[in-house]
Every structure is written in C-alpha cells, then in structure tokens.
Amino acid sequence: MSDEIKTAPNVAEPASDLGLFGPLSASWQIHGDPSGFVGGIRALLLQALSMRAMRAVTEFSDYRADPWGRLLRTSDFIMTTTYRSEVAAANAIAQVRRVHESISGFDPGSGQEYSASSPELLAFIHNCFVDSMLASYQVFVRPLPPEIQLKYLAEQAVIARALGAKMSAVILDPSRLAPAIEGFSDIGMSEGARRAYEDISNPSFPSLAVILGPLWRLVFAAALDLLPPFAQEFYQVGDFRPAAILRARTVASVAQVARLVLPSHPYLRSAKYQWYRQGTSSRHR
C-alpha cells in the first residue's frame, strides 16, 4: 500500500496493477460487501450534520436535481480508489480535488466561512465515512477483529491524505471515531440537513418503484438505527430496540441473498480477474 498518491496522467491501467490496497486488504473485504450500502446512507446522514458541509452541498451541488447521479459518482469514486489501478485512483482523487477547489463561501447558520478543500472538514467527512462502513459491516456481516479495523483505518487514511485532509484529525483508532465526529466544530441541525434527510428518506426512483420503494425504506430505517445517539437526537428518530433488531436481521438476510444472486461491482470483478490471472501466470513460470 502506498503512503503517498501522486497524480498520474490519464493513461491505460497496467494489468499488473492491483491498486492502492490489494486483494488481501481490509478495504477490499469491506467495500465489496452489500452491507456498504447501509453504511453509505449512514455516512451521508452524519456528514449532513456539519453545517458548513451542507451549505456547500446546498449551494454548489446538483444532488436534489440528480440524486442518483450524485450517488453513483460517489460510489464510483469509492470503488475506483479501492479496486482499480493506482493510476485510476490518482486520477479520481485529482478530479475530486479540482472540484473542491471551486467550492467556498459563507454559512450564516454557523457564522463560519466554508471551503470544500478545508483540511478539517475533509477529515470530518472521512471519519464519518469510515466509521459508517465499519459499523454497517459489523452489524450486517460479522464483527471485525481489532487488527482488521486498525488495518482498514490505516488504508483509508491514504485516501484522506491524498484528498488534503488534516491528518492529525483523521482518526486511526476505532474507539476514537465516535467522539471525534460528535465533537466536530460545527455539528448542528440546519435547514440543509433537514432537506437532505427528507430527500434521502423518500427519493424518486427512476424505475422499479414498486420493488425499490419498500427495500429503500427498510435500508434507510436500518441506517437510522445505526446512527449514534447524538445524531438520532438531531434527526428526532426513535430507538425502539425490538424493531431495530428485527430490521438488522432482515437487512442481514437481504445482504446475504444479494451476495448469492447479484453480480459484484464491475471494478471488483475486474480486479479479482486480474489477481487470478497474475496467480495463474506465476504458477506456470
């Protein structure tokens, strides 16, 4: 795993390049599982509680006009930096940094200026993401040993560094993630966070609404169940434990079915194929 990611030209990806982390990484394990979808929603809800972050999203993002496009772009970034080559990861990171550089302004709610390139804000966004992915995987798949959690946080810190996050605020200890998120400087319920909650809870589906609607409501409710208490209080959602346990079991079952019947992400399939080809080639030398 590289400690630094250098921007690379947009060239063909070498077949021998298995990316920043490689097949035996914790990132490959966690990001390739369907449970990550719940983690992604949880991360968005946590990130929305930064008033500066939501001001930037509200003023500069098209997420309300194109929520699925925004979701797909975010997913593509995560899967690119996890499973594609170091060249592809560097290009994806450079593109995100270029977008961030154009986003800045003033948030009257917090009384602070904001910038999408703020190292402190980038660290907060990162911490919300990794905390959510760990929480989701451990509830809907299985608990992870401490050494795997530490490994995952160390791997993902490479991405945080490359994006420009303040590394002293990027948490590498799982036990410190929740306090760091709750103690962030401008946590609060803004109008942007309320709209984000409404949009995420009831999106307009492009098709298959009869099937996707109930499934989305289940997944969204499961993400709410995973929120830390301070975030549940901001969103005014209850924590009726028996219902939460039942939802967790249902989502775990749905995730298991998805693993069995749905194809994995194309980038993951391609990375596994390259890994297999490398192993086959080395055995025949």
Image (cartoon, grey):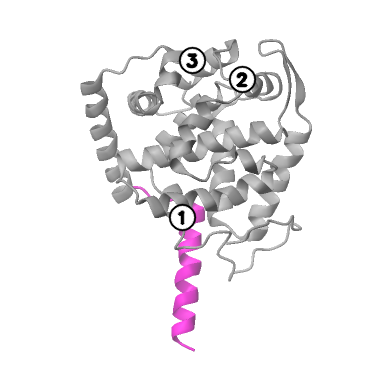
Distance Cα–Cα, label 3 vs label 1:
32 Å
Q: What's the amino acid at mark 1?
A: Trp
**Residue 252: horizontal and vertical position, in percent?**
28, 38
Query: Which mark, residue 28?
Result: 1
Crowd band around label 1 with a 10 angstrom C-alpha radius: few (<14), some (14–19), many (20+) = some
Left/right of residue 27 with respect to residue 191 in the rendered view: left
Residue on which the image places disc 3: 198
Name which residue lies at 50% across and 61% down.
Answer: 271
Residue on which the image places disc 2: 186
Q: Secondary structure at mark 1?
A: helix
Query: Which mark, residue 71?
Result: none
Q: What's the amino acid at mark 2?
A: Asp
Left/right of residue 242 with respect to residue 6 in the rendered view: left
Distance Cα–Cα, label 1 vs label 2:
32 Å
Q: Quadrant of the N terminus?
A: bottom right
First of labels 3, 1 by sequence position: 1
The secondary structure that dominates the magenta segment is helix
Crowd band around label 3 with a 10 angstrom C-alpha radius: few (<14), some (14–19), many (20+) = few
Name which residue lies at 55% across and 64% down.
Answer: 18
Q: Which residues are magenta?
A: 262-285
Specify whether residue 69 is in view: no
